[in-house]
């Protein structure tokens, strides 16, 4: 995979960047004052269409079908939006989203997105580096992990009204993973505010890991010394490890991870070999030096 420091999603689409949700006006003001947005570690692959990205999703809070999020997420209220910050952090509190991310630089990134079900997309995200937010909040010495929780609101998220998942959805990263510049808190895609079905108003994006690590609709960020529990690892630990790094050499117990189906590529020619760390090995492989990735999966 090739990466470009100067590639922007506007190079491949005529749409214009804007952030117009009320709760992130403060961040939008900072964005407007910036002469240009950093492209970061974007891939030069062509993004999927907006229709692909917003109509084929895993988001079990709205149902188990790939079309369920687009069908039912419109009922979710995303403004106002509060995020609780707690644990080993200098500035704990309950923040309005706009206040939380105010003053932090918003970037455009085109990332490959790989699902554990062996399908993939290329998505033009906009958001901020998680590291910039953690530095603003002040991580205390001894903190080793960052834990996240999703909103619980079953009256608007019908998938939470039953099933086997113990809500809220939980995820977590090791602190060095969270501080890696690839790790984003995304607030939009394709130059638009984040659609509800994709995790509005703010979600995690960790492009070298399987998609279930990229938790949506975040309402809690906690700094901890202990490895946090994560939803799929709690449900099926023999299938879903804490790290969830994309690794074509370690199969899911029920299917191969050696190749992937590219959404939007048609029935023929729509499969490709899966890359280690989803192709981001140059940026992240050093995080796992000395680890047995067949055991720490």
Image: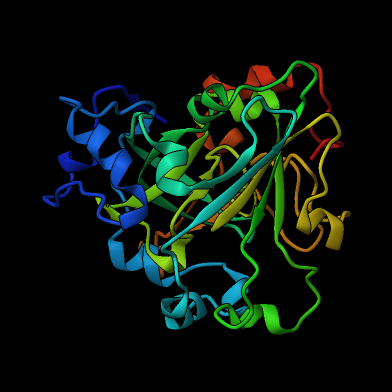
User: Is residue 236 visible to us here?
Assistant: no
Give me the residue at 53% from left, 21% from top.
283
Q: Quadrant of the C terminus?
A: top right
How many numbered markers are drawn?
Answer: 0
Of 116 and 201, the residue lying toward us: 201
Of 63 and 47, the residue lying toward us: 63
Give me the residue at 48% from left, 41% from top.
185
User: Is residue 293 visible to us here?
Assistant: yes
Residue 230 on image: x %, y %: 78, 51
Q: Quadrant of residue 48?
A: bottom left
Give me the residue at 16% from left, 39% from top.
11
Whether 102 is drawn above or below 60: the answer is above
20 sits left or right of 296 in the view: left
93 sits left or right of 23 in the view: right
Whether 109 is drawn above or below 95: the answer is above
Residue 203 on image: x %, y %: 51, 50
Give me the residue at 81% from left, 42% from top.
228
Determine the residue located farthest toward the left in the rendered image: 14
Residue 205 on image: x %, y %: 51, 44
227 sits left or right of 52 in the view: right
Of 79 and 186, the residue lying toward us: 79
Residue 160 on image: x %, y %: 68, 77
Whether 58 is drawn above or below 127: the answer is below
Q: Quadrant of the N terminus?
A: top left
Q: How is the image coloured?
A: rainbow
Of 217 and 197, the residue lying toward us: 217
């Amino acid at each position: 995979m090739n990466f470009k420091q100067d590639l922007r999603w506007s190079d491949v689409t005529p749409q214009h960047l804007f952030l117009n949700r009320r709760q992130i006006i403060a961040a939008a003001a900072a964005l407007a004052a910036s002469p240009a947005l950093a492209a970061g570690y974007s891939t030069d692959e062509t993004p999927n269409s907006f229709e692909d990205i917003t109509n084929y999703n895993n988001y079990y809070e709205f149902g188990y079908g790939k079309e369920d999020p687009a069908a039912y997420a419109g009922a979710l209220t995303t403004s106002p939006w509060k995020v609780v910050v707690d644990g080993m952090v200098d500035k704990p509190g309950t923040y309005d989203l706009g206040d939380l991310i105010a003053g932090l630089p918003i970037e455009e990134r085109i990332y490959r997105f790989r699902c554990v079900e062996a399908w993939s997309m290329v998505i033009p995200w906009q958001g901020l580096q998680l590291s910039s937010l953690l530095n603003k909040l002040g991580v205390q010495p001894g903190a080793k992990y960052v834990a996240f929780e999703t909103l619980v609101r079953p009256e608007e998220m019908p998938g939470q009204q039953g099933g086997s998942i113990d809500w809220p959805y939980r995820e977590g990263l090791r602190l060095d993973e969270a501080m890696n510049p690839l790790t984003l808190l995304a607030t939009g895609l394709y130059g638009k505010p984040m659609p509800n079905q994709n995790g509005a108003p703010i979600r995690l994006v960790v492009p070298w890991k399987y998609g279930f690590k990229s938790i949506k609709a975040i309402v809690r960020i906690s700094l901890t010394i202990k490895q946090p529990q994560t939803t799929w690892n709690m449900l099926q630990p023999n299938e879903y490890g804490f790290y969830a790094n994309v690794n074509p050499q370690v199969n899911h117990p029920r299917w191969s991870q050696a190749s992937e189906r590219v959404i939007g590529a048609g029935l023929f020619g729509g499969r490709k070999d899966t890359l280690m760390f989803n192709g981001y090995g140059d940026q992240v492989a050093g995080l796992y030096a000395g680890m047995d990735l067949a055991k720490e999966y």
